[in-house]
Amino acid sequence: MIESSENKKRIFYIVVLILTLIATLISTTLAYYSFVRSQKDESTKLYTGKLEIDYIDGVYIKNPELWPKKSVDFNATANVYRNNFAVTSSGTLDQTISIDLVVTNNEFREGSLRYNLYSDKGIELSTGNVPKDGSINLINNLFLAHDGTSKYVLIIWLRETKNNQNSDMGKTVTGKINIYSKQLKY
């Protein structure tokens, strides 16, 4: 009688264990299929941003031949430093870009060199003095849509002062153009 009671308990526990395993298997399967079914197609997409810069006329400013000028416009090409560059966003995110001018050597007198930054359509975006050295931000927060390209023109020129500027002859200026981007949140 004791053996029969032990056998009944074992059988009972085995049946409970088997039923528990079956219930666990069924609930796990249902949870998995419910999870898979509830996922949207776009929930697994990854959005990225990619910035490509084409320095058409080069990234470095190296000893341009500058002559004094009262002012310049978008079409100025003679006796100025002119740099064309394009920025392309080939990712899936919109971006804002900033453009900096980094001057490593400027032998001209303070305030003698000026810059103008234009869009490729000839719209003046910013203007100012080229520093003796260091970095100057030309413009911030220019919107660049994904799969979009924006083109810019940087012109550096020697400002005419109506005084004798022979002391500026043979002077050099060197530097580079840096472009930074910030992706807009998706």
Image: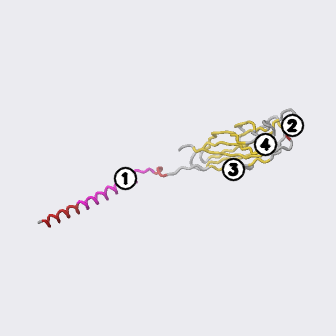
The residue where tag 3 is placed is: 54
Callout 2 touching callout 4 (CB < 8 Å): no
Looking at the rendered structure, the kind of residue marked 4 is: Asn
Question: Residue 142: x and y, percent?
Answer: 64, 40
Q: Which is nearer the eye, 40 or 103?
A: 103
Of the residues under marks 4 and 1, which one precedes in the sequence? 1
Question: Residue 150: x and y, percent?
Answer: 66, 44
Which segment did they paint magenta?
A: 16-40
Question: Residue 183: x and y, percent?
Answer: 58, 45
Callout 4 touching callout 1 (CB < 8 Å): no
The residue where tag 4 is placed is: 106
Q: Please identify the quarter of the rendering in which residue 21 is found.
A: bottom left
Looking at the rendered structure, the kind of residue marked 1 is: Ser
Q: Under tag 2, what secondary structure?
A: loop
Residue 34, numbered circle = 1
Question: Residue 36: x and y, percent?
Answer: 40, 54
Residue farthest front in this picture: 2
Of the residues under marks 1 and 2, which one precedes in the sequence? 1
Looking at the rendered structure, the kind of residue marked 2 is: Gln
Left or right of 68? Residue 135 is: left
